[in-house]
Image: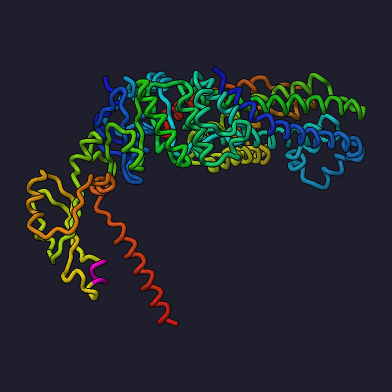
Amino acid sequence: MPVIHTDDLTKYYGDVRGIEDLSFDVDEGEVFGFLGPNGAGKTTAIRTLLGFQSPTAGSATVLGSDITDAPSLRKARGNIGYLPSEPGFDENVTGRRLLEYHGSLRGDVRSDEILELFDPPLDRNVGEYSRGNKQMLAIVMAFMHDPDLLIMDEPTSGLDPLKQEEFLEFIRAEQDRGKTFFFSSHILSEVRKVCDRIGIIREGKLVELEDVTSLINRSGKTVRANVAESVTATEFDIDGAHDVTVSGDSAGVGDTAAGDAGGESTSVSFTYTGAYEPLLRHLLEYDLLDLAIEEAPLEDVFMRFYGDHDAEAAVERVEHERADGADAEATDV
Amino acid sequence: MFETARFESERRLTGSAVVALGLSAFAAMMILLAPGIIDEFDVAALTETFSPALVEAMQLDVVATMEGFMALELYWFGWLLVLGVYVAYSAASTIAGDIDDGTMDTLLAAPVSRQQVLFEKFLSLLTPILVVNAVVLVVVYVGTQFVNEPIAAADLIAVHALSIPYLLFWGSYGVFVSVLAPRRLVAEGIAAGTLVATFLVKTIADGTDIEWLGVLSPTRYYDPVTILTVSEYDYSGAGILLVATAVLLLASGVLFARRDIQ
């Protein structure tokens, strides 16, 4: 039986969409990454699974408990660790008192052990804690009762890089002990490091659900070639090539006067999904100066799912408007 | 069981001590001032100056004794209004406040039921209620002995004991509002505002055509003036307040269980 099972899980806040028709399973012992841009519905999904809010439609079970069955889900929560994205604590008590309190609610079998890895200043008031210290306290609380399932909302936020690395290492070790992880993130490197499988959510809907390795395989290779002639993008529009871009070699432009290259050189880059042979045959038709074929960065894969958002164009547009506005003001004066 | 009640009670200790000290200081001052004021007080002259209705509304006719003076100055004002507002306000910030600052998430992630959380948070209101009552009871008893105007111990105990259902009622009302309100500030405002409004309605409506409105005011069911001046204890009033408290808590539990925590 899956640890988490959702079936067309839907949550609307009035007319505002939270999540829509989410269906996926998280199996025992796997690390499942839940990805998506801000506002995509990651937190809504997590809060609905924990029973903080009731679904508008659809159903879900967590550790076999129906999320709409409050008494059953309450028992299940005894075996779930939850790490919120912005942990909230009573601020005028010490971390130690807070741990003692939460330990009495959910049981404390290993806080000492976890405090060796994540060590917030327990004798200080939580109100004086930095963001990172709060996150560490929340981590101790999430793991102190040694739960089988960990639900985490952007778990490394607030941690310094060293602690982030330590935390990811800790997740791997816990996975070896048979623990299941469901966590949301938008930090791709950490997803790449620890996740077995990912679901990508966009505008409340699940748009992709796949193994990390097959996603990377499927996403293809980045090909960069530098050829000693002028070429157009259409020439490289072969089967399996996507997003072909062509640019004049910037180094070549400056060097033309010196004339050592003598002719034009052009850089071609594209994403390629397909067999090597036709690609190489095509490339060899040109005078190759340089060639690099590498795994496509995960970022590109996500950008494709996250949307057609072109960050550079967006910034340029805003900057342009600002400049126009300033010009208009200047002429007014 | 009761981990939350214990934790919340501990957190209320400081605030309770501050309120207890403040009301004790106020009580002590009133006790010291009382003999001089009572001596100079002339009810007949007041009745001539002000309309009889006003004299009755302000209950000026009973001020001329230590019991009446303390009932009006300390309990009427300090208990019905000040301590009542403190309890209602504290109760209103429980659920709505915890949701606002995210502590409700951390709490509800544990294997606890919402009804239990709500009830235990309500129970923690007993800390200020009991601490303030106990401290000021002693201060007033000792103080009135000291100025040689002792108040009957039974009456004094009754005026404090019977305030507990009244304060619990406002606690449950605060919790109820806290469950319904979208934000902490709204809950606090509504809870404290309702108390002040019902207090004024009772004070103003007495002896007028709209006296029936006073039935809705909790202040009708706890009257420190009759307790101290004529030793009449309104047990049925206390019973009504306790029943209303239980009803509000049950309703709050049901509503809280259905509410989305956002």
**Rendered image quadrant of residue B235:** top right
Q: Is residue A40 above or below residue A53?
A: below
Q: Is residue A41 above or below residue A27?
A: below
Is A252 part of what is drawn in magenta? yes
Q: Nearer the viewer, residue A307 or A232?
A: A232
Please provide the residue range marked out in magenta: A251-255
Q: Residue furthest front?
A: A260
Task: Give residue A205's position: percent from left, percent from top.
Answer: 26, 40
Q: Is residue A79 above or below residue A251?
A: above
Left or right relative to A156: residue A219:
left
Q: Nearer the viewer, residue A206 or B95?
A: A206
Determine the residue positioned at 26% across, 30% down: A58
Determine the residue positioned at 17% across, 59% down: A289
**Rendered image quadrant of residue A36:** top left
Q: Quadrant of the C terminus of chain A?
A: bottom left
Task: Give residue A258's position: percent from left, percent from top.
Answer: 24, 74
Q: Nearer the viewer, residue B238 or A212?
A: A212
Total numbered circles: 0
| Residue A139 shows in this picture | yes
| Residue B214 shows in this picture | no
Task: Give residue A17's position: percent from left, percent from top.
Answer: 31, 43
Left or right relative to A72: residue B52:
right
Is B241 part of what is drawn in magenta? no
Determine the residue positioned at 78% across, 28% down: B136
Q: Quadrant of the N terminus of chain A?
A: top left
**Rendered image quadrant of residue A69:** top left
Name the image colouring. rainbow
Q: Nearer the viewer, residue B21 or B28?
A: B21
Left or right relative to A280: residue A41:
right
Task: Give residue A248's position: percent from left, percent from top.
Answer: 20, 66
Dominant secondary-structure state across the stretch colored magenta: helix
